[in-house]
Amino acid sequence: MTPGTFELLGFGPQGWGFLLLKAAGTTIAAAICGFFLGSLFGLLGAALKLSSLLAPRMIGQFYTTIFRGVPEILIVYLLFFGGSVAVTQVMNLGGFPGFYSLPVFVIGVIAIGLVSGAYQTEAYRSAFLRLNRGQIEAGAACGMPRHLLLRRIIAPQTLRFALPALGNIWQSVLKETSLLSVIGLTELLRQAGTAAGSTRQPLLFYGIAAILFLIIGRMTGAALGGLERHLAKPWSR
Amino acid sequence: MTSPMQANTANTSPVIATEGLRKHFGTVEVLKGIDFSARDGEVISILGASGSGKSTFLRCLNLLEMPSAGRLHIFGEEVGLRAGKDRLRIANRRQVDRLRTQVAMVFQNFCLWSHMTVLENLMEAPVHVQGRSRAEIREEAEAMLARVGLTARRDAYPAQLSGGQQQRAAIARALVMKPRVLLFDEPTSALDPELVGEVLKVMRDLADEGRTMLIVTHEMAFARDVSSRILFLDQGQIGAEGTPQQLFGGGHNPRFDQFVSRFNQG
Ligand SMILES: Nc1ncnc2c1ncn2[C@@H]1O[C@H](COP(=O)(O)OP(=O)(O)OP(=O)(O)O)[C@@H](O)[C@H]1O
Ligand SMILES: [Mg+2]
């Protein structure tokens, strides 16, 4: 007797429900970690690109050109193979022979961080350029030291201006975690593929994966939208 | 320390003084050696044609603009400046930040922080820069807002206020720091004509209180009525200096008379 749809998606012995939820959790975790790592790279990239010196500007430009220009799946592969080669070499040099590799989750997060960081660089940079110089001067004229200017004036306004672009980047980060299935990370797409293969019900499981992606995207999108409206309030009339 | 500025007793020693203050942008010399001092309680209007260097001069006094050469004393204290590539540099940021809390500035474009309410704008620097207690500051900020007539708008954001209201809020923001000098750079130039009066009224009250004020302005009548002294900048130099009676009486300085008559026509 073959199990019905309900059983297949349920949490019983024949059901894939638990594994799918776990994979959805992995997707969310990879997206969140990758996005926040990307924020770090993005802030650094923006600082480099906004520098008054040529060398940092060129480094920043190089970074965004590479990671926006090379297909993300290639970045994932390059990091996966390059990462193992590097770690193996280090371990071998340190007197531990054999083959080593990094956990795929870590590689995936780094890949997403690097790529989304390149896009976040532009989001932060253009938000910073929208800041009103006079408001920064007003802070300086009150005797605010630089760290206070950054924390109290520059950061909140930059975040507010960057948020719409960051929201878009978040949505694509969420989708692009599915690329990590190629290096063996059991995220939503890969888990759906496994289930599809063993039950011969691809439409059902890929369909479920699609719905889960949509749900995660809509929920996080709504949260970001709320934050955006909250931060935009002072600018509305 | 042979400067004549320091040879005075405490209450007459200059609040702000410059010696040989110069500033150039590229090859353009905007300030050509300004010797100036302002004493406690003086209200000094800085007049001059557009491009004569008024804003640049005022901004050099709190180092929003770095002079190319010269010396600056604030409250009798020499501000540490060291040589840089094309201009002087701040030698000690802490000194400058400390002095800036006592030298407040009001800008042409108000420059309120747009992500904070009016009340938050007023409380920001006293709380975070001066480290005063919120409760104490809140009371003072409310009193200050009442004074400039903005009590009802204290929870509004700057974008929700008229220009005149924004400028009054900006003046209140400057005042809550209890500064010893107030610098104004064309505080009414960005306002619709019907809003100029409300801001000038607040400034007039401050002058009557005996506050020390340096005001760059194009409001001739205001400058004449309110100032204790006029500083006329002419092509980066002090073209004339004196009481409003001396200067506006005419015949004191031909360039100033020309400036005023052109102004009255224009
Ligand atoms: N950041 C700058 N870079 C280059 N030139 C500048 C800069 N700021 C001012 N200048 C020039 O310096 C000169 C004096 O400018 P400043 O703003 O001090 O004049 P002002 O007397 O305040 O004029 P206005 O009445 O129009 O405000 C002008 O010729 C101006 O073009
Ligand atoms: Mg000016």
Image (cartoon, coloured by chain):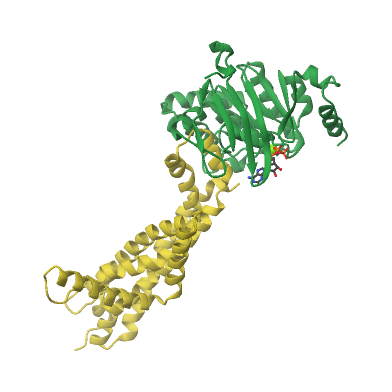
Where does residue A142 sit, x and y in percent of width and height? Answer: 51, 33
Among the 4 quarters of the image, the one containing residue B88 = top right
Quadrant into which the C terminus of chain B falls: top right
Q: Specify the farthest residue to the front.
A: B2
> Does A177 sit left or right of B201 as displayed?
left
Residue B220: image quadrant is top right
Q: Which is nearer the eye, A199 or A43?
A: A43
- Which chain is the one coloured green? B
Judge whether A157 appears above or below B196 on screen. Answer: below
Above or below, comparing residue A73 to residue B45 in the picture: below
Which chain is tinted yellow? A
Total number of numbered labels? Answer: 0
Q: Residue at x 60, y 29 (%)?
A: B171
Q: From where the camera sits, is residue B37 visible?
A: yes
Q: Residue furthest right?
A: B265
Q: Nearer the viewer, residue B159 or A151?
A: A151
Which residue is depicted at the point 26% across and 69% down?
A: A105
Q: Nearer the viewer, residue A171 or A209?
A: A171
Find residue A35 and report its horizontal and vertical position in percent. Answer: 37, 62
- Is residue A20 positioned above or below B20 on the image? below
User: Residue B129, position in %: x, y?
Assistant: 44, 32
Image location (x, y in percent) of residue B116: 51, 40
Do we see residue A166 in this rendering?
no
Q: Is residue A141 above or below residue A155?
A: above
Residue drawn at (72%, 34%) of the image: B195
Quadrant in the rendering for residue B190:
top right
